[in-house]
Image (cartoon, helix red, strand yellow):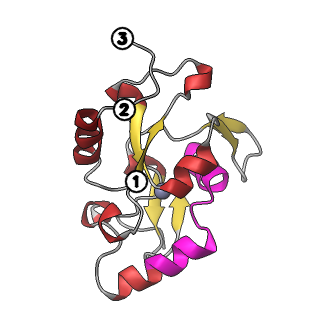
Amino acid sequence: MPRRRAVSRTMQAQIRQRAQALCEYCHTAEQWQYVPFTVDHIVPLVHGGMTTLTNLALACFHCNRRKSAQQTGLDPISGVVVPLFHPRQQRWLDHFVWSADGLLVAGRTATGRATITALALNRERAVAIRAADVAVGRHPPRDDLHDLPLP
Ligand SMILES: [Zn+2]
């Protein structure tokens, strides 16, 4: 496979459909955002990551920028550096859960907690947008509610 930065429109459409138009890190819905989401190289190009469907994830601008070339982060509970969430190899609900009010994402695992910290998934602006989305019933994503939230 060629190692290219450019992601074709066909691949972008496949990635968007696979992600159900959610940022694969913070699970924000692209539908309600002004800026279209970007495509993240899960293993960054600078670390040898390829522009292939197995290494690409839909990401909101903020998550993509915060993640940058990071692949690991500090778990704030254990103090251990662990791999960040990998959307192609891991399931979001295994690592994250919404608070009962839907405003905050919590980590179920060290990887979840490290990703929340590294990507600032509970940044003030994101929480404010979630609050507005909760009020009109379009957040959290319906499929995220199959698992019970943390108390
Ligand atoms: Zn995001």
Q: Confirm whether residue 89 shows in the render.
A: no
Which residue position holds label 3? 1
Which residue position holds label 1? 37
Residue 126 placement, left or right of 148: right
Query: Up-down: is 11 above or below 48?
Result: below
Query: Which label belongs to residue 7?
Result: 2
> What's the amino acid at mark 2?
Val
**Which residues lie in the magenta part?**
110-130
Residue 27 painted magenta = no
> What's the amino acid at mark 1?
Phe
Q: Secondary structure at mark 3?
A: loop
Query: Up-down: is 25 above or below 33?
Result: above
Disc 1 residue: CB within 8 Å of ligand 1? yes
Q: Please provide percent x and percent y for residue 79.
A: 77, 45
In front of the other: 56 or 109: 56
Q: What secondary structure is the stretch in magenta mostly built from? A: helix
Which badge, 1 or 2, is on the more N-terminal residue? 2
Q: Please provide percent x and percent y for residue 126.
A: 53, 71
Q: Please provide percent x and percent y for residue 67.
A: 60, 44
Of badges 2 and 3, nearer the viewer stands 2
> What's the amino acid at mark 3?
Met
Query: Up-down: is 104 above or below 54?
Result: below
Residue at the extreme right of the image, as rendered: 79
Residue 49 placement, left or right of 117: left
Q: Secondary structure at mark 2?
A: loop
Q: Please provide percent x and percent y for residue 151.
A: 48, 74
Which badge, 3 or 1, is on the more N-terminal residue? 3
Q: Residue at x 45, y 16 (%)?
A: 3
